[in-house]
Amino acid sequence: MKTQRTPWHTATLVVGWLVSFGALAISGMAAAANTSTADHSKFKELQKHFASGPEVTKACLTCHTEAAKQVHRTKHWTWEYLNPVTQQKVGKKTMVNNFCISAGPNLPACASCHVGYGWKDASFDFKSEVNVDCLVCHDTTGIYRKPAGLAGNPVTKRMELPPGSGKFVDPIDLTKIAQKVSKSSRDTCGVCHFYGGGGDAVKHGDLDSSMSAPDREVDVHMDATGLDFTCGTCHATSAHDVPGSRFAPTVKDEGMKRIRGKKDDSNPANCVACHGKRPHPIQQAKLNDHTSKIACETCHIPAFARGGPATKMFWDWSTAGKMNEKGKPFQKKDEDGHVIYDSKKGDFILAKNVIPEYMWFNGTVYYTLVSDKIDPTKVVQISRFEGSPTDGKSLIFPVKVFRGKQPYDAGNNTLVTPHTAGTDDAAYWNTFSWPKAIAAGMAVTGAPFSGKIGFVETEMRWPINHMVAPKENALACQQCHSDNGRLKGIQGIYMPGRDSSRYLDILGGGAAFFALLGVLGHGALRIFSKRKKGGN
Amino acid sequence: MTEKVYIFKRFERFWHWTQAATILFLLLTGFEVHGAYKLFGFGRAVDLHTIAAWTLITLWVFAVFWHFTTGEWRQYIPTLDKVGAMIKYYLTGIFTDAPHPFRATTLTKHNPLQRLAYLFLWLGITPIIWFSGWFYLFYGQWRDWGVDRFLSLEWVAFFHVLGAYMILVFVIAHTYLITAGHTPTSHLKAMITGWEDTH
């Protein structure tokens, strides 16, 4: 998404960006120099010209012999996850969403966020160690790029991208990048996780480019001039396995605070892991009473998309494919410069400072997969959160509910996986034909396609965990404890200020009213009888 | 001719007025927590309500101690003697300027209806308030105490609010009956100065 800016604004931004980027780069390097015991620029293996990504990996593996094997075991590599609770096989590889719908038939574009090189179709060798991309997570230069269309490869030779576009991209200096590798950072994680769904802030709303160097208001932990947490501070990674996932989030953390040396299987990417279950000081003990029913995030993330970029809240694919008067695809923007219509994608609604929706959630998520039948007369829940006030495992949790309308197979009543990105004849973004795009996409997925296409309303749920506000910006009591508070629709709990027994209020209020009426009447009679007597 | 009787001792008066103020404040903040109106804001109302409750508890500890060491607890021993006369007085006598059927003394400072009312307040209403309030306040400890299996906040709140309405009715009647002494101000004077005018 592009935003409209004045030239002066742009110049200020560029200068600001250069200054801050320079400062960050210097401080980053200084930090790396201070803590690391290795200066990779002195390694002979890295003092050569690298013609491709896998060549760099080969050099990395000469010392880090187990690294690729470790990466192979992770979701970052397999894009697959077997949920032990639901027994559903999920993961980016096969899942459907209501953003760009499906990665499977669009790998040359989507795999630019895969932690590997060259995954363009089913022939990809998942056992290859040299195909693991070390640089994307360990780059410190900020120049490493894996453009869409190259199946996760960086540009190593000057090339036209996309082919036939007339736009050329210069190769990046893999040697320089390799010599400067260090720990992963907010930027390296963010290069994929901030831009999920095809652009900055699009997907999550609580993860966007503002988290690269957030101020305290946006994220109290990651505050670049304060606590300065990186992603890895909470997502404490061991053997390349990054804990914390939206496929199976930890909602009610029954672990205790993490203590070194203590055996601990709890999820470190969880508030309770550091703060415990009674995190508020004794003066605010009442707040601690909330932790059995309410996730920390509910009060401490009062809104998402707070850092500047707007997040997508609604996406209607059914209106895609309109052309302008010249017969060309076009875009429409709102007054803030957000694209609200794109011929390739349809209509959007974007929003900033979004108040989450709240629901009981126990950490179990069910997905509607391509193999599942849907009921097109209802809104299809692509992801559905399980939870209830009585299961003992649920908390009230803040959620981004992403709504949309997307194509489905009206013959088989299943969701479909269109082939959208690419320059071939079937790619929707090239030739704007749903039948061709869906047929091609379903052929890749291997699911049956009847040829009948309809559009169905869908919803997805995204847990809100990031952009933790400073405590002074946490929700105030009355934002929930009132008739029209944020938790208005939450059932199964008694909330003072929101709930009361109507009969008791009628009875009690009535009793008080009649008592008042009684004493006033009695008093009036006394005054009246006294006057009468006085008059006599 | 006006006679003066010393009825209420210094601690008793202090206790009464502090308690009166605290109870009114508890009603004010409590009904805000209940959602009846907005005054302090929910969170502040909860805090103030809690502080006021602890204040009242402290006061009560002293008051109970005082009542037992001084023997003043006997003032609440119920009696049905003259209850009928009191009711009759409030229903008719008070309008015709009939003499008040009860004469307060240092040894029996409450009329029989008062005795019954206060006894009901101490043994009927306040236990409801204190028990429900205690569990309301320590909601976070229910699991540790093992009471979470049979207590629900909904019912605890129900009884607390029920108690509050009963106290509200009591306060209304009590405030009015201040004026129903031998003279309209004799009770009030007694509770301020300790001395009640009788005639």
Image (tube, coloured by chain):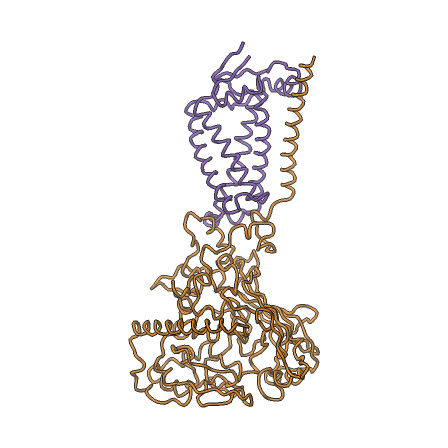
Q: Chain B is drawn in which colour?
A: purple
Along the viewing direction, whichever of A291 and A101 lies nearer the viewer: A101
Query: Nearest the camera: B45 or B105?
Result: B45
Residue B156 visible in the picture:
no
Q: Judge left or right: residue A34 versus residue B59.
A: left
Residue A389 found in image quarter: bottom right
Taking depth in this image into account, of B72 and A484 the one nearest to the observer is: A484
Q: Give the x, y percent position of residue A204.
A: 53, 69
Task: Please give left or right for residue A218 compared with residue B95 in the image.
Answer: left
Q: Relative to residue A36, is residue A132 depicted above or below?
A: below
Q: Quadrant of the N terminus of chain B?
A: top right
Looking at the picture, does residue A386 appear above or below residue A143? above
Give me the residue at 46% from left, 25% from top: B12
Where, quadrant-wise, is the C terminus of chain B in this rendering? top right
* Res A361 visible: yes
Residue, x 51% and y 39% (percent of image)? Answer: B131
Q: How many labels does the image show?
A: 0
Q: Which of A404 and A126 is in front in this view?
A: A404
In x, y percent, where is residue A44? 30, 86
Q: Can you give x and y, in whole percent of width and height, for residue A194 in the image?
A: 49, 72
Q: Residue furthest front?
A: A8
Q: Name above or below for residue A468 compared with residue A444.
A: above
Figure quadrant of residue A166: bottom right
Which residue occupies the extreme top position in the image? Answer: B1
Q: Position of residue B161 (x, y in %)?
A: 57, 40
Say which colour chain A has: orange
